[in-house]
């Protein structure tokens, strides 16, 4: 049996072709190949495809299923235009990396998943709002998100702005009303507010916009992405561990893990933007270069970017092993979203 990915020209042969049959799993196969440096006309061996499929489905799929169900319940019911836009933007697919990291961390710290459903929904709501606003004409001006029209194209700019605003505030309402003790709820609210605000995600986005068309040093580029991408990843780890009695003893290690994971994830994203196409990415490919954005490939080239990706991936995995019991759930997730993709 033969399968084919016409969007990028990868031939999938053998058993793997019959199971790699969704956009999300195709994305991860191609992510591996591009980060690894495979040529787009290469044939991918069946054992590679099967490995990539396993990478995609376990344990990530278990967390994805849980967060999709939780988000559907947490969002306002469909029927009103604003609610429809919020649901469109939030439930429209995606890897759910941040929620998965949160759940995996909670598992390793012995925190029941139903205790952190609200936090997982909150971090995904913040992420969804940021994507809505990023796509607006005044920001990155992108008409495509997750393989379909971005929210301001599916609705209109005013509705998209308000949907993003509503998701932002919903995130903190979810944390405030979670079943956790008041002190833990307050700590989670503070953690997410710090990560999403002027010194975190929004500040990083502002830095990215201000630096467009300019040449940055590597430390300057990493400082921008530490906020723009890394802050929410670090927050997800802390949100999953905060309810645990021994959280404070591991807070610094969670920071270290999130720091390296955030850098590695951004490098992978930059490489994909430079080498993949829109059908695979689910958003407009080549946008960074067209807009004069500062990226790792633009600054360092693809080979050095891949080398730095490998370095930070390894450091993230090393940090994870210093968490309770060696963090088997988190390490398994990292092995699939980082190690197996390099």
Image: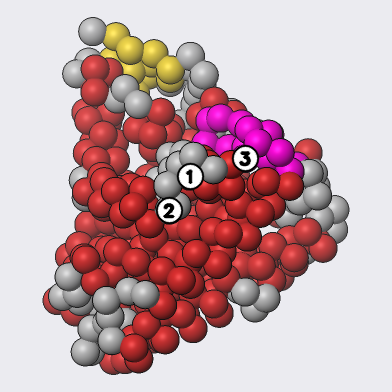
The residue under the point 27% across, 76% down is: 179
Image mark for residue 75: 2
Residue at 46% in and 80% down:
189
Location of residue 45 by image quarter? top left
Q: Are marks 1 and 2 in contact (CB under 8 Å)?
A: yes
User: In 3D space, how far apart are the residues under numbered discs 3 and 2 (Cα atoms)?
Assistant: 16 Å
Mark 1 and mark 2: Cα distance apart in space: 7 Å
Q: Which residues are magenta?
A: 141-157
Q: Is residue 286 above or below residue 335?
A: above
Q: Residue at x 42, y 86 (%)?
A: 186
Q: Is residue 141 left or right of residue 119?
A: right
The mark that comes first in sequence, 1 or 2, is 2
Q: Which mark is residue 324?
A: none
Determine the CA span between mark 3 and mark 1. Answer: 10 Å
Numbered disc 3: secondary structure: helix
Residue 234 place in picture, x, y as percent = 45, 72
- What residue does disc 1 label? 87
Determine whether 7 is above or below 215 in the image.
above
Mark found first going from the N terminus, 3 or 2: 2
Q: Which residue is mark 3?
A: 151
The residue depicted at 61 percent of the width and 52 percent of the height is 163
Secondary structure under tag 1 reads: helix
Q: Which comes sooner in the sequence, label 3 or label 1?
A: 1
Q: Secondary structure at mark 2?
A: loop
Residue 311 visible? The answer is no
For residue 229, side relative to residue 189 (left or right): right
| Quadrant, the N terminus | top left
């Amino acid at each position: 049996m033969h399968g084919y990915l016409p969007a990028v020209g990868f031939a999938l042969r053998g058993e793997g072709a019959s199971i790699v049959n969704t956009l999300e799993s195709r994305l991860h196969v191609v992510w591996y190949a591009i980060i690894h440096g495979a040529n787009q006309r290469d044939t991918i061996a069946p054992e590679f495809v099967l490995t990539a499929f396993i990478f995609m489905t376990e344990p990530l799929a278990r967390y994805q299923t849980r967060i999709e169900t939780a988000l559907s319940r947490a969002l306002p019911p469909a029927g009103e235009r604003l609610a429809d836009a919020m649901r469109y933007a939030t439930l429209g697919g995606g890897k759910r990396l941040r929620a998965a990291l949160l759940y995996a961390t909670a598992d390793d710290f012995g925190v029941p998943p139903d205790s952190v459903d609200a936090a997982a929904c909150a971090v995904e709501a913040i992420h969804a709002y940021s994507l809505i606003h990023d796509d607006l004409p005044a920001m990155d001006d992108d008409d495509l998100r997750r393989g379909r029209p971005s929210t301001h194209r599916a609705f209109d700019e005013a509705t998209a702005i308000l949907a993003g605003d509503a998701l932002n505030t919903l995130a903190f309402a979810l944390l405030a009303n979670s079943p956790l003790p008041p002190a833990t709820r307050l700590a989670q609210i503070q953690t997410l507010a710090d990560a999403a605000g002027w010194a975190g995600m929004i500040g990083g986005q502002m830095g990215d916009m201000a630096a467009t068309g300019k040449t940055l040093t590597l430390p300057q580029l990493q400082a921008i992405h530490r906020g723009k991408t890394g802050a929410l990843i670090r927050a997800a780890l802390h949100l999953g561990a905060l309810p645990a009695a021994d959280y404070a003893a591991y807070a610094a290690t969670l920071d270290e893990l999130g720091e390296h994971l955030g850098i590695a994830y951004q490098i992978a994203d930059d490489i994909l933007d430079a080498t993949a196409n829109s059908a695979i990415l689910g958003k407009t490919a080549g946008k960074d270069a067209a807009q004069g954005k500062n990226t790792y490939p633009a600054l360092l080239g693809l080979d050095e970017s891949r080398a730095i990706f490998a370095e930070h991936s390894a450091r993230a995995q090393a940090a994870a092993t210093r968490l309770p019991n060696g963090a088997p759930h988190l390490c398994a997730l990292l092995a699939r979203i980082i190690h197996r993709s390099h």
